[in-house]
Image: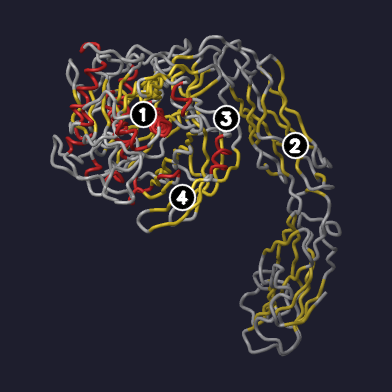
Amino acid sequence: MIRHHARSVRIASIVTLTLAAACSKSSGSSDSTAAILVQFQAAAAAVPESGPAFDVAVRLGLTGMMLASDVTVMVSDAGTGTATSGVDHASFAPVTVTFLAGATDGAVETVTLTPLADMLAEGDETVTLALSAPTGGAALGAVATVTVSIIDATPPLVRFRAPSSATVDESDGVHTVTVELDLDPGVSLDADVQVDVSDAGSGTATSGADYATFASQTLTFPALTADGVSFEVGVTVQDDGSLEGDETVVLVLSNASPPAALGAGSTHTMTITDDDASTLPFLVATSGEVGAETPLADGDTLDLGSQQSGTGPNAGERVTLANLGTLPMALSAPVLVGGDASDFSIEVLPDGLPLGMKAPPVLVAAPFTVQYETPGEGAVLSIDLARLAELAEQSRVLLTGVPIPGAGSVVLELERLPLPFTEDAVLLVDGSIVPGGPAALAADLSIWKGTVAGLAGSSAFLSFSRHGTRGWIRFDGSPSGELHIAALEGGAARVMWADQLPETEAVDPEAFCASALAPPGGMPDAGAGPAAPPGTQQLSAADCRLAIATDYQLFLEFGTVQGTTTYVTELIAALSDRYFTDVQTTISIAYLEVWSTAGDPWTTPDGGGDTLDMLNEFRDAWAPSNGGAWPVEADLAHFISGASLGGGIAYVNVLCSDNFGFGVSANINGNINWGTFTGNPASFTWDFVVVGHELGHNFGAQHTHSYCPPLDACQATCSGPQVCSDGTLMSYCHLCPGGMSNIFLEFHPHIANVIRTSVNSSCLGQSSLDGDDEVSYRVRFSPISGAGSKATTLRFVHDAANEASPFTVQLTGESLP
């Protein structure tokens, strides 16, 4: 078909080709110097097999103004393409294209080529059209042929039917994996298709030992094969009788022959399920996120990447230790030893050792609503007791509608924690033992930890009871990114950002922590260098039992025995969660005494004394060397006072010492005085920090500014004057502008390592990792010692026979200036 027009292509969406007829003499040969040329507008084009008819353009080229007479040229199928005329495209009979007299330079005439769809997968094919026999003094231009590619509408794909599979066990036998052909319905192959399947060699199973050597195979799908036809490839599993955990074989497809291509499932991971059960502990270590773990052997190196010095930890790596045996495995708290230990950090991940039940989360509305919001002071919340009761029945929740001052609301993903009591915990009220212990008075208390749903790196800790809602939500890695919830009178609560908390009074540092007292034997080394190697005892999630004494002044802050008991429980639960994350040690209440009358046995809170006076009175009453006695068996004794004694004080490195395992935390009030806003310490900031700080001394830690070089300089140090910055639980950074909002509610990585080392060499006793259980850690690079390459050794002591103890991993990182 011929169309006369001086436009471009008739259908703009169709690929356009051009012919130029130019010749000053009637010749079938190309002559670029002729006055009149005819040629195709392009030498190649492509069209879908299922597309409509499209136009091929022939172009006129002139050196004069216009044609004096008609010019013609013949367009025909050259017969050299791979497409079949009448099958892949409509038969193309020779067509004469005419440019009429008067046509000007650039005039275009078109011919039509019609592709035909079929039900064969045959790949792309071509049609070649050619110009010939120009007349009217024209010659052929340089583009005298055009090759049109007809794109196959149904390219065949070859793939594994499933990306992964697993054997039932590792018994000898053949496990089959399916390779299939993927075509559109009704389509079949036009020719044979071949593909190779081979062992990628990247699995964890050993060829020749865990499975028979898998030789590369070539699979052939013959012509006319339809969609869904498949081959079964067999992998022969060999039972080696060794306890080694599940292992993998990775198969890969390659070299698919045209017209086929490899589909998305070109690899298949086959898991050989280990069935060699053992009653003995069996340690398996891996690194990497869930689903992408890499095995770790003793002595392996784990590169944690780079981080700018002094900017905090990087994202780090997940390290998981699993016990594949049946019997429990003793496992120490991890410690960093040698080299640049202070430049690295470790924390237990929330999905580590099981702290709570693992039921699916239940969607629950937050048990509070906003009453009003005041600029600079956050929002006041009212508590819905019915929702509180509903929440108390759950173990895992998605808590919706949690209000954020000035920013709407968020959803929290929370897991309930057990109350921090020993099995035989004693509650003494006004000198008399209460049946059922402290748990009997804290029955309506529920304690939760978790994250902001969908926000990586966030964390949350909340406690709920009819005596008050308390806790915090951390959105990012800075103290100012923390939202605090404090209980108010009448069961209400206030929620506010950390920078809205009232600052603590600018007291002398000695009034905050009167001293880190050294017991006989002296103060532990304060160098910020390598920590000592772990002791001989093997501990995991060791539990430190606290015997807690309080005074009448603390009771006055809450007004009831139940309210006082609930608050102390909340406080210890929050600290236990922090110690578990940073130190792999929990804290529980073995004894709690509450006094609801002014007739308590303590005189210092009534007589204007300070924390050192209180510590001496407390120790005189309980230390055996002074003629006293502990009321129960415990690992540390702590006095929590509501009196204004100035702060806290504690002996250093005294775990399990009957004579020196004492500390005092004072100025505890549980609530901010929002009526006067005079700078009283903030609940769950001051209370949490001072008790956590003094217990940290008992566990062996000193102040962050006491190490040389210092971990921070919020107090004048061995190397210079005060330099304010963000701080951690053992710092004095609350004395800088911003107060408690400067404090991260966590231990500095070096402090955490000091405490873990202390725990490992203490009397706290062995804990264990149950059979078929695992614990995961986040190991991070947090350089503070300047630029350059850093390295240290991560050590775990264990009692599994299959790995060396201690099990070590070399950590490396590059500190940037």
Is residue 543 found left or right of 739 in the rendered image? Answer: right
Are discs 1 and 4 less than 8 Å apart at CB?
A: no
Q: How far apart are marks 3 and 4 (CA)?
A: 30 Å
Question: Would you place residue 417 above or below residue 99 in this image?
Answer: above
Crowding at mark 4 (Cα within 10 Å: few <14, some 14-19, many 20+): many
Quadrant assignment, res 473: top left
The percent coordinates of residue 439 (x first, y second) are 47, 25
Q: How far apart are marks 1 and 4 (CA)?
A: 46 Å
Quadrant assignment, res 740: top left
Check disc 2 and report the residue beneath it.
180
Are discs 1 and 2 less than 8 Å apart at CB?
A: no
Is residue 130 found left or right of 814 in the rendered image? Answer: right
Crowding at mark 2 (Cα within 10 Å: few <14, some 14-19, many 20+): many
Check disc 4 and report the residue beneath it.
381
Check disc 3 and report the residue beneath it.
358
Mark 3 or mark 1: name the one nearer the start of the chain. Answer: 3
Check disc 1 and report the residue beneath it.
811
